[in-house]
Image (cartoon, rainbow, N blue to C red):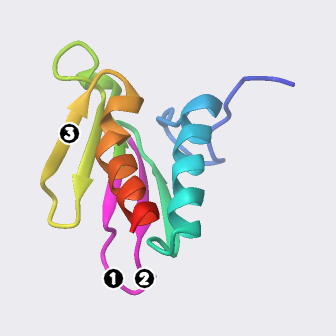
């Protein structure tokens, strides 16, 4: 299996995406949140400068969380960001796991109730 990523036809430049491991970690969290009844839908955005995974409580509203990957910030504040519904950055870091920690803690509270 090839690890090469090909842009959509007609694209003028390369786009940022998630690796298989990164997307696997995000989709695993999404699946657990769906099983807990917290999330109902998702969207994925691939741009020239960033990639984002959007998680929705309902399809017809703004995303509850955005998990963003900004490779240009790798050397500074970290390329990963967790953004809430209001657009406020809740967590930023160099590793995906600690950035997802607030959502995973919330999931543990939902299961314990």
User: Percent from the top left, x then y, of residue 95?
Assistant: 36, 23
Q: Residue furthest right?
A: 1
Give the mark nearer the N terminus: 1 vs 3: 1
Residue nearest the observer in this picture, 108 or 96: 108
Mark 1 or 3, closer to the camera: 3
Residue 53 % position (x, y): 44, 52
Q: Name which quarter of the figure residue 1 lies in.
A: top right
Q: Residue at x 30, y 21 (%)?
A: 94
Q: Residue at x 36, y 41 (%)?
A: 100
Query: Dots 1 and 2: beta carbons under 8 Å?
Result: yes
Give the labeled residue for mark 2. 58
Instruction: Tell me residue 48's x, y (percent).
Output: 40, 39
Q: Residue furthest front?
A: 113
Any magenta on residue 54? yes
Whole-angstrom CA distance, mark 1 to mark 2, is 6 Å
Badge 2 element: loop
Vertical relation: 6 (above or below) 95:
below
Mark count: 3
- State the CA–CA distance, disc 2 to disc 3: 23 Å
Q: Is residue 95 left or right of residue 73?
A: right
Q: Which residue is mark 1?
A: 61
Name the spot of residue 88 as percent of width and height, x first: 12, 54
């Amino acid at each position: 299996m090839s690890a090469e990523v090909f842009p959509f036809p007609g694209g003028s430049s390369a786009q940022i995406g998630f690796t298989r491991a990164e997307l696997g970690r995000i989709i695993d969290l999404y699946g657990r949140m769906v099983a807990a009844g917290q999330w109902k839908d998702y969207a994925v955005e691939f741009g020239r400068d960033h990639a984002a995974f959007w998680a929705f409580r309902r399809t017809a509203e703004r995303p509850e969380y955005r998990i963003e990957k900004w490779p240009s910030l790798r050397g500074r504040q970290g390329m990963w960001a967790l953004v809430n519904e209001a657009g406020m950055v809740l967590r930023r870091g160099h590793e995906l796991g600690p950035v997802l920690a607030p959502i995973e803690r919330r999931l543990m509270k939902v299961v314990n109730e």
